[in-house]
Image (cartoon, grey):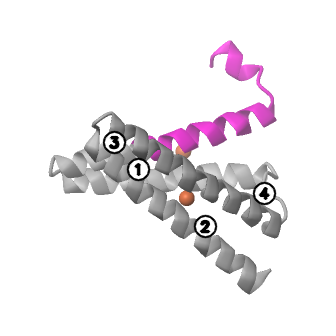
């Protein structure tokens, strides 16, 4: 075991695990996209299964660390993040268009719409349940 790991506090272990698992989720899912594009469907499926496990690990560590506060406040915070992401992705789309990166611009557009949809879903939760 590296010296560094031994001297870390429980809180540091938990915090490192949250960021590590978070990174892994995105990386496994990106690997799965590559596998899909290469026609390796079973490889993609397995990588997605692993990504889901990693997401669950990160979520549980975050929950156990007490990082999730009052649900209404959490939803409001995420709502403002989704709204910011909508604007940010539109900005990214314009930059990608200007740089002639069509596929990237198109995906920024698609993802921006997803963020807008997420915001609408959260607004709906606030109206219906809080
Ligand atoms: Fe994990
Ligand atoms: Fe989102």
Residue 34: percent from left, percent from top: 26, 44
Earlier-in-chain disc, 4 versus 1:
4
Dot 2: what SS?
A: helix
Dot label at residue 56: none
Measured Cα–Cα span from mark 4 to mark 1: 29 Å
Numbered disc total: 4
Image-quarter location of ligand 1: top right
Viewer-nearest of discs 2 and 3: 3
| Mark 1 residue's CB less than 8 Å from ligand 2 | no
* Residue 43 horizontal side relative to residue 11, left or right: left
Q: Which of marks 3 and 4 is in front?
A: 3
Queried whether the magenta region covers residue 17, the answer comes back as yes
Mark 2 CB within 8 Å of ligand 2: yes
Kindly indicate whether the residue at mark 1 contacts the one at mark 4 (C-beta within 8 angstroms). no
Label 1 or label 2, whichever comes before in sequence order: 1
- In front here: 101 or 17? 101
Which residue is found at the position 35% from the left and 51% from the top? 107
* Foreground label between 4 and 1: 1
Q: Nearer the viewer, residue 84 or 53?
A: 84
The residues tagged by marks 3 and 1 sit, at their Cα atoms, a distance apart of: 10 Å
Q: Name the residue under label 1.
A: 108
In this picture, which residue range is highlighted in magenta?
1-27
Q: Name the residue under label 2.
A: 119
Mark 3 highlights which residue?
Answer: 97
* Mark 3 neighbour density, 10 Å: few (under 14) some (14–19) many (20 or more): some
Earlier residue among tags 3 and 4: 4
């Amino acid at each position: 075991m590296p010296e560094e790991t031994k001297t870390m506090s429980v809180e540091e272990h938990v915090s490192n695990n949250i960021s590590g698992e978070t990174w892994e989720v995105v990386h496994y899912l990106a690997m799965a996209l590559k596998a899909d594009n290469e026609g390796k469907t079973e490889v993609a499926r397995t990588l997605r299964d692993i990504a889901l496990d990693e997401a669950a690990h990160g979520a549980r560590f975050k929950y156990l660390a007490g990082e999730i506060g009052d649900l209404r406040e959490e939803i409001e915070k995420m709502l403002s993040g989704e709204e910011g992401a909508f604007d940010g992705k539109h900005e990214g789309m314009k930059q990608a268009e200007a740089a002639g990166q069509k596929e990237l611009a198109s995906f920024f557009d698609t993802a921006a719409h997803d963020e807008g949809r997420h915001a609408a879903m959260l607004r709906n939760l606030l109206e219906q349940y809080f």
